[in-house]
């Protein structure tokens, strides 16, 4: 299966059997749509990230797509509503509570924050030939791109068939990752393919 952007574009064309230039010209858009779909549904080890932030204020911009764990001064953070965080600030309660407001994390008091979560992989392009999806989920990416192509060409049977294959692959990859995930939580360790 394709492990680079160039190979992926060729594979989408070959598997689809399409020859019309209008459709072939849209293959990069199909791949981008497939990546966007995988962002919300697939978790592979190379997407994990751990960041330490020495917060000197009460609001921290979040660059992580999805949080898995928050440690505040070494203790597990407690997710609460923003109104509760504001109330705790008035009480000068230096707790481990936090809230997510838009693209920011709100905390009660300045603290050392350790964030572990999922980052969105870099987008594939001619200058970016590989990412987490081409390295660890190439089948899911290919099949999802073919599903988008099926929608574009109004071929509902093909779109559903490719989407079904992609969904099964995504589910299998997520299940495999869950089985082997560290007992201490998500770790930013390169995945090793066993199949």
Image (cartoon, rainbow, N blue to C red):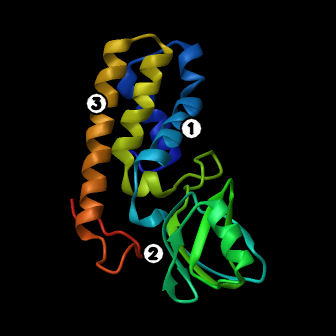
Where does the N terminus fall, quadrant-wise?
A: top left
Image height check: is 95 above or below 58? below
Q: Residue at horizontal 46%, vertical 22%?
A: 149
For disc 1, the marked residue is: 32
Q: Are marks 2 and 1 in contact (CB under 8 Å)?
A: no
Neighbours of disc 2 within 10 Å: few (<14), some (14-19), many (20+):
some
Neighbours of disc 1 within 10 Å: few (<14), some (14-19), many (20+):
some
Whichever of labels 2 and 3 marks the residue nearer the N terminus, that label is 3
Q: Which tag is nearer the camera, tag 2 or tag 1?
A: 2
Whichever of labels 1 and 3 marks the residue nearer the N terminus, that label is 1
Q: Residue at horizontal 47%, vertical 46%?
A: 40
3D distance between C-alphas at marks 2 and 1: 25 Å
Image height check: is 66 above or below 11? below
Q: Is residue 120 visible?
A: yes
Residue 32: where, in percent of width, then height?
A: 56, 37
Which quadrant of the view contains residue 157?
top left
Residue 26: where, in percent of width, then height?
A: 58, 24
Judged from the image, the secondary structure of the residue bearing numbered disc 3 is helix
Name the one closer to the observer, 13 or 84. Answer: 84
Q: Which tag is nearer the camera, tag 1 or tag 3?
A: 3
Name the one closer to the observer, 107 or 36. Answer: 107
Neighbours of disc 3 within 10 Å: few (<14), some (14-19), many (20+):
some
Left or right for 158, reference 101? left
Q: Residue at horizontal 29%, vertical 53%?
A: 173
- The mark found on residue 188 in the picture is 2
Name, please, the residue furthest toward the right: 57
For disc 3, the marked residue is: 164
């Amino acid at each position: 299966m394709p492990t680079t952007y160039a190979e992926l574009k060729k594979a989408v064309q070959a598997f689809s059997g399409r020859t019309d230039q209008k459709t072939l010209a849209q293959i990069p858009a199909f791949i981008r749509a497939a990546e966007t779909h995988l962002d919300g549904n697939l978790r592979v080890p190379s997407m994990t990230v751990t960041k330490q932030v020495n917060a000197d204020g009460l609001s921290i911009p979040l660059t992580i797509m999805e949080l898995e764990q928050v440690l505040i001064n070494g203790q597990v953070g407690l997710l609460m509503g923003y109104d509760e965080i504001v109330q705790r600030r008035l009480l000068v309660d230096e707790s481990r509570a936090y809230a997510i407001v838009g693209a920011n994390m709100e905390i009660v008091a300045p603290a050392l924050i350790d964030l572990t979560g999922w980052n969105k992989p870099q987008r594939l392009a001619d200058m970016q030939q590989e990412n987490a999806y081409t390295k660890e989920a190439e089948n899911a990416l290919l099949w999802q791109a073919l599903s988008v192509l099926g929608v574009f060409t109004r071929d509902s049977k093909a779109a559903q068939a490719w989407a079904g294959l992609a969904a099964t692959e995504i589910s299998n990859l997520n299940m495999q990752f869950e089985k082997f995930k560290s007992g201490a939580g998500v770790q930013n360790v390169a995945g090793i393919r066993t199949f």
